[in-house]
Image (cartoon, rainbow, N blue to C red):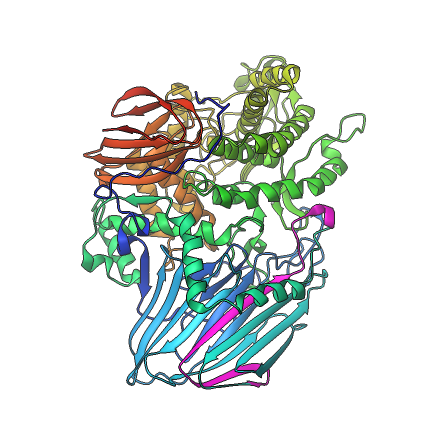
Amino acid sequence: MFNFRPLFFLASGVFLHASVLHAEDGGGGWKSSRFWFSRPAEWKETRPQKGTGDTSWAKDATPIGNGRIGALIYGGLGKDHLELTEISMWSGGFCSSEAKDKGPDSLKFGSYQPFGTLEITYPAADGMKDYRRELDVGRALASVSYSTGDVRYRREYFASIPHQVISMTVEGDKPRSVDAVFRLTTLHPQDRITSTAGGGRGMILIQGKLKNGLAYEGRIAILPKGGTVKASDGAVVVEKADSCRVLVSLATDYVLDAARNWKGESPRKRNDAVLARALKVPSGKMKRDHLLAYGKFYNRVSLDLGETEDATAGLPIDERLKKYKKAVNEGTESPDPDLEELIFNFGRYVIISSSQPGNLPANLQGLWNYSLIPPWDSDYHNNINIQMCYWGVEPANLPECYEPLVRYIREMAPAARRITRETAEFKAASGTPAPGWTSRTAQNIFGGQGFKWNKPASAWYALHLWEHYLFTLDRDYLKTTAYPMMKEICQFWESQLKVMNEGGSNFRTEDKKVTPEVVSRDLKDIRAGMLAAPMGWSPEHGPKEDGCAHDQQIVWELFHDTVQAAEVLDVDRAWRKELAAKRDLLVGPRVGEEGMLLEWMIDRKPGSGSWDPHHRHTSHLFAVYPGSQISPAKTPEWAEAARKSLLARGTTGDSRRSWTWAWRTNLWARFLDGRKAYEMIQGMIRYSMMDSLFTTHPPMQVDGTMGIVAGFAEMLLQSHTGRLHLLPALPGAWKDGSVRGLKARGNISVDMAWKGGRVTQFSLSSPAAQSVKVFFNGEEKTYALTPGVAVKEK
């Protein structure tokens, strides 16, 4: 086991020799960090506004973001569009009901809202040629270039983290060649849009307030070099400029602080401060600052899985994806390894772009939106989706990007506590309110909840609180933030667990097919005193009943992790002993007659009509991943039953969902099956990936895009069993390769290279003094890590 009482001080990461690893662009140079289109993205003037499964808005647009504000770039010729968003632009408020009140005018649950569209009109591009729209995920730069007449035009876009603006530059390679009309449009009829010009610059201002009282303001600063600029009917017109720089600042008065009732400083004040600084920064310096800030995140990890031919890697992304899919259909194992690296790198790009400290976490659509009523309101679903968005954050060495999730959990707790206390289902027989809290499945940004109760939601959140500690070994965080919340969530479950009778005679279910005879048959092994989570639901199918595997496994993980946390802090000795005893009384994983891990205490047969055997969720396999109760090394019988259960789920129909592929990649990796894990990655590309590299459920959701990052990492490095396992699920397609900068539990940075499927060298470093076991090439060795000193093995 890791020593969780470390000595803390900083140590720089240690890299393998440059001849082994690519040091830039995510591991494969331009082939795995840049992709491009030979055409503009499809723009629709008429937008779906009823939460439909339409994915056209995201299928080929280019996303940029800095964790708070973002844009989807369409790159049109005569007319370009930037769909602008700000992460706190939400309707709705505090609520709790199964029905969700949606839309821009909602005062209840609400929906994530688009901020507005920056529309830029250019002169007709007669004779246009050599069009290229590109996203460089290695530098977080988007661009559009093309030629018309004798002028070569280029537009460059980025979302600055340090300066908190979106920057756009338009330039031609001939003097006085830039003519453009800038206009801001909105879907909110109450918005007031004005434009001004003077002193050689223009400004577009949008101001508004939603019915829930959320105030917002956006400013577009237009800064031409040369030429003329004037305001006209809410627009800004630039003529005969050599180039034009545009800065976008967006703000609301929302603050992620329950104690302040979500109200912060005015958006006007925020924009004043942002633009006062940004307008003083020359464009070259702003770009350098951006590259430096982004690179501090992105360049921590580098992955090399092989080399793709230049001709293939140089194709437009839609053609490159078609070629990949065709090769997969024909049985080629790895037709484009750099594309696979690119998908890993794009997932990291989306994490960095949509989750930055001090902001809300990524929602169902990350940071981007097109509709007043997006699918599922682009909310925070806590029965897999928000959690999956953060699975890859720690292994990809992005701990700062985890902060929004931790902060969100903490700030939503007071409202969740209130709702939980008021819910009759959770009260004791005496009417005493339940301690602690949990949540319904859907959450907004005001403490509001909707859809069905997801009783173990808070317990699943607790796993993330604990995992952040395991990867960082931040003892102060554990003491002041994670452990108090974990303990409170345990207290909720201590109050809720049902004490079972001998043979499960007090078992409850809403499934009318479960007769007393079925209970007697299937629960004869249940002993008096065992504990079950009452009347749960296995997301998102089957009956409501006692002891669903999903609930049991999550509560086991909660109790187990909290006991460990208390031991690390050396607190609550008597209580943690009681908690460990309750953990051991929980009804554990169960194996059915067909040798599969059961999703419910009752052994339901596939096709019985009570459940969907090919359902997209694999809720009963939580204990395999992201949990740790089941593993081939420690619980081989359960692991084999879980593996059979996953095989039975299949990969057709409802199982072909974007995030489903990501979860199953991680599951197969935990089963140490690289071939099957790799099939899941190929399945995601083949069936669920759009040309933008976003994945679609349908509709578009970012959880699969972000979750697959964890899948890649889990195939290369595992640390959940108390030792480091190098290349635990390496597919044959990746027989030669290298990776730099992955993070293991214990705050250990790992670099390694391999050939023929065997590790040839690796390097471990950590700011914490500890002893660590490492399993590689079929053997286990123990290493003593010293802060500031890398341990190398060749």
Q: Residue furthest right?
A: 430
Q: Nearer the viewer, residue 90 or 600?
A: 90
- Where's residue 673, x and y in %? 31, 32
- Where's residue 357, x and y in %? 55, 48
Query: Does 55 appear above or below 780?
Result: below
Residue 119 seen anywhere in this rendered image of the structure: yes
Q: Toward which corner of the image does residue 488 lie, by quadrant? A: top right
Query: Does 228 appear above or below 419?
Result: below
Query: Does 216 appear above or below 375?
Result: below
- Total number of numbered discs in the rendering: 0
- Where's residue 405, x and y in %? 56, 43
Q: For the magenta stretch, what is the residue range?
A: 231-260
Q: Nearer the viewer, residue 710 or 229?
A: 229
- Quadrant where the C terminus is found in the figure: top left
The secondary structure making up most of the magenta span is: strand
Q: Is residue 335 magenta?
A: no
Query: Does 226 appear above or below 551?
Result: below
Residue 661 seen anywhere in this rendered image of the structure: no
Residue drawn at point x = 47 percent, y = 77 percent: 120
Q: Nearer the viewer, residue 303 or 549?
A: 303
Q: Nearer the viewer, residue 502 or 116?
A: 116
Residue drawn at point x = 55 percent, y = 18 percent: 523
Q: Is residue 254 magenta?
A: yes
Residue drawn at point x = 55 percent, y = 72 percent: 220
- Where's residue 55, x and y in %? 45, 60
- Quadrant where the N terminus is found in the figure: top left
